[in-house]
Image (cartoon, helix red, strand yellow):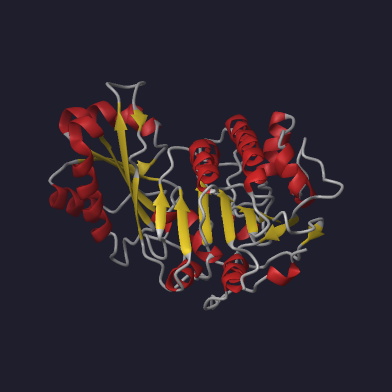
């Protein structure tokens, strides 16, 4: 029999707990997302996460170590060669990424790609640089509405993003153009991790707003993951947030898009009322997208505290045979230089009403230990990478 009937994994996107052992290779020495945010704002108030052992993992202003934490707690470090969303999540589910996805942060996309994308879609292209998703709308949104030129931009991630107005350009037309971009960027010299449709609305500069109709066109994982192994054995694999996009739908049996991290937690709470047998995999992206990349520690801190309030509603819903895992996929220190992700270790908090808790886990040397633990619990085919910590839980 399975030790746990339902496993709920919540990824607090970019909530790192200090520089990784190889941070120097990534230019990230001194990065510390949670620690530096707490120092920047004076203190964080996260009482529910604190009781599970967050303060026992890392020094966080306002979140002191619990005397007897209810959770099993520890850290994970990334073994793969990236610090992006896809790399982190794919590794969690059992893959070891040995080649980084291509980024075009410093140069924009090659003119050959831009020309072919324009020819294939029938639209001129403006932008073609690394930019904040909201700032580039103020810069180019009105020009786009007047000319139907697509706003193409990138970021520190391996992404090609296309922004277009839902009403003047059309949502379906945006999706069509993104599908063409995905096809073009499958070529080895242009291969990016994700093509992202970024629809927006609004009459003009200062009033543009991105909508919830974002759609990610990701690469398919290059091998089977824990999600596939669960699905093959008829277990439920429920996605909340952008998980379904990160895995390009592979291994997912049911998906729920989120409008925000707060909405994602509300969806998770609602889904806890459902009888399912398997995994619920949740990504809360606003920590990263809204606050980390925009270098806003105050906004990041408020998002963390809102998550903690929602966690307080979620915890009483856990049954004896439920297992909750809180972790992250990389760091994004809003007090650090630049606007890139940061190479950090991530928290690992594991809680169930049936566990004793007050147990410090051995530091995991790869995120893949999480996927190995999930497949071990459900007695499916084991992931080829990673070591289960199921027997270490107390």
Q: Locate residue 112, reporting x and y percent.
A: 22, 55
Count of numbered tags:
0
Task: Kindly identify the residue that appears in the image at 42 percent across and 65 percent down.
Answer: 251
Task: Kindly identify the residue that appears in the image at 36 percent across and 28 percent down.
Answer: 209
Q: Is residue 118 left or right of residue 349?
A: left
Q: Quadrant of the N terminus?
A: bottom right
Location of residue 360 with respect to 372 vertically, above or below: above
Q: Locate residue 206, reporting x and y percent.
A: 36, 21
Task: Kindly identify the residue that appears in the image at 77 percent across and 35 percent down.
Answer: 62
User: Which one is in front, 125 or 34?
Assistant: 34
Location of residue 283 with respect to 145 vertically, above or below: below
User: Which one is in front, 179 or 69?
Assistant: 69
> What is the quadrant of residue 379 in the picture?
bottom right
Q: Locate residue 44, reporting x and y percent.
A: 71, 34
> What is the quadrant of residue 61 in the picture?
top right
Q: Is residue 115 left or right of residue 102?
A: left
Q: Is residue 296 visible?
A: yes
Task: Kindly identify the residue that appears in the image at 66 percent across and 61 percent down.
Answer: 76
Q: List the single residue furthest toward the right.
A: 67
Q: Is residue 335 visible?
A: no
User: Which one is in front, 308 or 295?
Assistant: 308
Q: Locate residue 287, reporting x and y percent.
A: 55, 40
Q: Quadrant of the C terminus?
A: bottom right
């Amino acid at each position: 029999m399975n030790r746990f009937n339902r496993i709920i994994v919540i990824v607090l996107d970019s909530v790192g707990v200090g520089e990784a052992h190889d941070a120097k290779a990534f230019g990230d020495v001194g990065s510390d997302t949670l620690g530096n945010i707490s120092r920047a704002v004076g203190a964080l108030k996260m009482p529910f996460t604190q009781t599970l052992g967050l303060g026992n993992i890392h020094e966080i202003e306002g979140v002191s170590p619990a005397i007897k934490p209810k959770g099993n707690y520890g850290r994970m470090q990334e073994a793969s060669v990236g610090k992006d969303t896809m790399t982190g999540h794919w590794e969690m589910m059992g893959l070891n990424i040995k080649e980084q996805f291509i980024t075009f942060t410093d140069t924009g996309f090659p003119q050959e790609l831009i020309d072919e994308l324009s020819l294939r879609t029938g639209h001129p292209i403006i932008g073609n640089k690394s930019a904040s998703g909201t700032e580039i709308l103020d810069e180019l949104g009105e020009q786009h509405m007047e000319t139907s030129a697509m706003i193409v931009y990138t970021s520190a991630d391996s992404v090609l993003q296309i922004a277009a107005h839902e009403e003047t350009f059309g949502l379906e037309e945006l999706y069509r153009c993104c599908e063409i971009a995905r096809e073009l960027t499958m070529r080895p010299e242009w291969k990016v991790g994700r093509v992202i449709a970024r629809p927006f609305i609004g009459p003009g500069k200062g009033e543009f707003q991105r909508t919830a109709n974002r759609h990610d066109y990701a690469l398919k994982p290059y091998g089977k993951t824990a999600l596939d192994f669960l699905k093959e054995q008829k277990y439920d694999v429920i996605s909340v947030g952008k998980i379904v996009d990160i895995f390009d739908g592979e291994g997912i049996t049911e998906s729920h898009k989120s409008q925000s991290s707060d909405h994602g937690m509300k969806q998770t709470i609602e889904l806890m009322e459902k009888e399912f047998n398997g995994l619920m995999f949740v990504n809360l992206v606003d920590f990263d997208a809204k606050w980390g990349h925009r270098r806003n520690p105050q906004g990041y801190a408020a998002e963390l505290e809102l998550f903690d309030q929602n966690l307080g509603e979620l915890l009483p819903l856990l049954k004896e045979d439920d297992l909750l895992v809180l972790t992250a996929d990389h760091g994004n220190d809003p007090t650090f230089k630049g606007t890139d992700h940061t190479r950090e270790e991530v928290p690992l908090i594991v809680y169930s009403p049936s566990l004793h808790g007050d147990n410090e886990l051995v530091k995991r040397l790869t995120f893949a230990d999480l996927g190995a633990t999930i497949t071990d619990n459900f007695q499916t085919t084991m992931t080829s990478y990673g070591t289960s910590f199921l027997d270490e839980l107390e």
